[in-house]
Amino acid sequence: MKIRYASRTPKPDFERETGATRVELGPLLRESDVVTLHTPSTPETKGVINGDTLARVRPGAILVNTARGDLVREEALAIALEEGRLGAAGLDVYTDEPAIHPRLRAAPRTVLLPHIGSATHDTRRRMAAIALANVRAVLAGRAPLTPVYRS
């Protein structure tokens, strides 16, 4: 299996660990059997999957979006599925959550789920432990274990 990714910046550690190759978005869409989105919503990425980019996707490819709903223009995705240009789509995030575009809801070969990947007791327990460790570190005058910085 070949792993390709599109990013503004190279990810040498990721490339070394996975054997991935950084490519431009156009070739990635044309050459991939499965395209998964793993990017934040920014002015640059909002609507990155739209009618134009879907026209470049390899026929029969699968699109998966578990990142942010507004990365995908849902009506354009529904049209690509209806016309058979896209093999399938799986989403657990939507532009106007919790609402799902009606045309996408009716589109063939589509799996639509709620975004609840972390909703297990074990995962939530670990998340709470990390949050508590961060609070304890800050109260003790140390840096938090998992800081979030404004860019």
Image: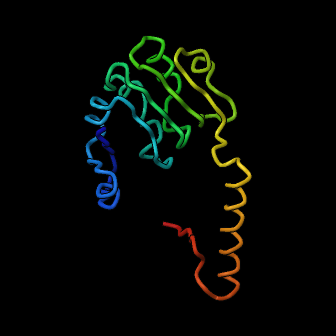
- Residue that extends furthest to the bottom in the rendered view of this protein: 141
Viewed as shown, does residue 48 lie left or right of 12? right
Q: Position of residue 94 (x, y in %)?
A: 60, 34
User: How many dots with numbers?
Assistant: 0
Viewed as shown, does residue 52 lie left or right of 106? left
Q: Which quadrant is home to the N terminus?
A: top left
Q: Position of residue 144 (x, y in %)?
A: 60, 77
11 and 150: which one is in front? 11
Viewed as shown, does residue 134 lie left or right of 91? right
Quarter residue 56 falls in: top left
* Residue at 50% from the left image edge and 47% from the top image edge: 41
Image height of 130 relative to 17, above or below: below
Q: How is the image coloured?
A: rainbow
- Residue that extends furthest to the top in the rendered view of this protein: 83
Image height of 96 relative to 80, above or below: below
* Residue at 44% from the left image edge and 38% from the top image edge: 36
Image height of 40 relative to 147, above or below: above
135 and 40: which one is in front? 135
* Residue at 56% from the left image edge and 71% from the top image edge: 147
* Residue at 28% from the left image edge and 29% from the top image edge: 30
130 and 91: which one is in front? 130
Q: Position of residue 73 (x, y in %)?
A: 49, 29
Q: Position of residue 63 (x, y in %)?
A: 44, 30
Quarter residue 52 falls in: top left
Quarter residue 29 falls in: top left
